[in-house]
Amino acid sequence: MTGGQTVLSGANSGRKLLSDLIAATRSSETPIPAFLDFDRVEVATASFLREAVIGFRDYARQALRNVYPVVANLLPAVTEELDFFVRARGDALWSCELDGNDGVVSARLIGELDPAQRSTFEAVIELGAITAPELAVRFPSQGIGATAWNNRLSALATKGLLVERKQGKSKSFSPLLEIA
């Protein structure tokens, strides 16, 4: 992804990588993670991450409905910078380590979800694929209707945290990755 660079800085460099990622990424018939591999990157500035990572995540979630960007193999300094940036925005995204065969080793969220999104995300992690009406039935004590559950689930899908699948007239949501 980075052409061997160990320091990624500046909005212009981030926009260049965003352009390259858009040109290289094709739509998919089925949901797939798109790993943004930061292996050997020692430093990445917030401006670079904003333009490249968040820019690509937002583009993919709007234009490539089945492509879900995930940052991978982050060193601690890059994790810290990205976490600080997305928390300040009230945002979150998937991060993981990849093994030699691009298999996910340890998935986790970077950033922060508001309490409503956090509880919804945790419910989906626990239950697996689920619909908004099913959540309304499963958690009646919360007094949340299917429409509100759907809004929460859709917001998490927009962030790329949940996979959204059409099932007839309704939608099912499931985690993109499994939490390690």
Image: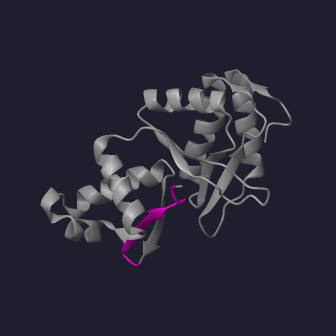
Q: Is residue 177 magenta?
A: yes
Q: Position of residue 61 (x, y in %)?
A: 54, 51
Quadrant into which the N terminus falls = top right
Front one among 133 and 82? 82
Residue 16, picture quadrant: top right
- Residue in the foreground of this view, choosing between 172 and 98: 98
Q: Position of residue 63 (x, y in %)?
A: 59, 52
Residue furthest bottom as drawn: 168
Q: Is residue 89 magenta?
A: no
Image quadrant occupied by the C terminus: bottom right
Question: At x 67% / y 53%, what residue is drawn?
Answer: 34
- Residue 143, can we see it? no
Magenta extent:
168-179
Q: Up-down: is 170 above or below 93?
A: below
Q: Residue at x 60, y 33 (%)?
A: 79
Q: Nearer the viewer, residue 39 or 22?
A: 39
Residue found farthest to the top: 10
Q: Residue at x 58, y 61 (%)?
A: 66
